Image (cartoon, rainbow, N blue to C red):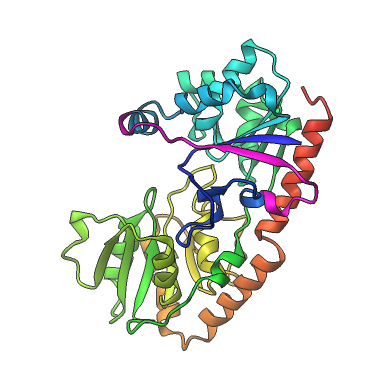
Amino acid sequence: MKILMLVNWKVEYTNKKPRDKQPPDYYIKGESYWFYRYFKENVEVDVIDIHSCKWIENFEKNKIRFYIIQTLRAISKLKKYDLIVSHGMQSGVLLSLWRKLFNTKAKHIVFDIGSFNSAGESGFTLKLMQFASKSIDGVIYHTSSQIDYYKKFFPWIIDKSKFIKFGTDLGFFKSNALVKKQDADSYILCVGYSKRDWDTLVKAYQQINTDKKLRLVGKVYEKYKNIKGVEQIPFVPINDLINQVYNALFCVLPLESFNYSYGQMTLMQQMALGKCVIAAKVPSLVDYVEDGLTAIFYEPKNIEDCKNKMVILLNDTRALSDTIGRTAVNHLNDICNEMIMANEIEDFFTYIYSFDVN
């Protein structure tokens, strides 16, 4: 089987494994890309990312929110492949529209990360997505509640869609050098570059009497600069981020509540490093956490609940947080690792390739 994968991020095309990137972020010619290395059958996978000149990249990502140049690169190659796989509808909507007009040999599968239109329920974009989606041959989603959205607005994809849990690459974290720093266990860590409910977390932290710092990694906000105990660090490379997580007392993941997939990679990266994570109980995480066993939930936007859960761990003698951290690692090993995800994806790809589901 020959597969062309369109991803909605930049990929480094290289001849050797980079030290500072995870498998989704690099492609080595002649080697299996990302989760495909776990496929039981040999497949040939080519990857097209979203790189272009800077102003076009910014326009596509921030203004129109889909990728024209990437799709044009793919259209000229469709005849060479059996499957086209779009990771996100930003990389799939134009191709879906093209296939509505022109028949192609290659079938089209979409990883629907964002519920087509951020689970929007009205407007032109929803109608566009509904029209385009009718040419899609298969849909994979990582948040089980997305099926309720499909039933209401995309019922024609129900029989050709499949919920598959996202899986993390445990080997990547084990292979990186973990270094205990002088500030180990002196801070609570929160990581994120978008859609984080910083306000709830910071307000909850302000109500706690502790000498532990609250370290926010990802963006720097003016309004948090002068708050006692709050540290802000902008973007850091993945190897540095791993050690930031490794040295944290525990982690907090304060997500907004949306009915689509996000935050799962951050959650599982921290779990893979044996950290106890306090996370907002939002749709994208409920499939991945056993509350009190593999992580701790708090109610989204609930400052008091967030504070209380942090106090439990701050008053703990490490017994609870260490136990949850160890259970989290075992959970990923047994249920949510990249190999298990890849095996389910391969079975779905084979089904879509072999049968006409339209």
Please state which of residues 202 and 269 is positioned toward the viewer in this rendering: 269
**In the image, farthest residue toward the top:** 101
Residue 226: percent from left, percent from top? 16, 65
Please state which of residues 135 and 208 is positioned toward the viewer in this rendering: 135
Left or right: 180 with respect to 199?
Answer: right
**In the image, farthest residue toward the front:** 15
120 to 288, vertically: above or below: above
Q: Quadrant of the N terminus?
A: top right
Residue 5: percent from left, percent from top? 61, 36
Whether residue 227 appears in this view of the structure is yes
At 66% from the left and 40% from the top, the residue drawn is 45
Left or right: 350 with respect to 252?
Answer: right
Q: Is residue 11 magenta?
A: no
Residue 299: percent from left, percent from top? 47, 59
Residue 197: percent from left, percent from top? 36, 54
**In the image, farthest residue toward the bottom:** 317
9 to 228, vertically: above or below: above
Please state which of residues 151 and 328 is positioned toward the viewer in this rendering: 328
Q: Residue 66 is drawn in which quadrant?
A: top left
Labels in figure, total? 0
At 45% from the left and 75% from the top, the residue drawn is 246
Q: Which residues are magenta?
A: 36-55
At 52% from the left and 34% from the top, the residue drawn is 119
**In the image, farthest residue toward the left:** 226
Please state which of residues 90 and 313 is positioned toward the viewer in this rendering: 90
70 to 302, vertically: above or below: above
Q: Quadrant of the C terminus?
A: top right
Whether residue 129 appears in this view of the structure is no
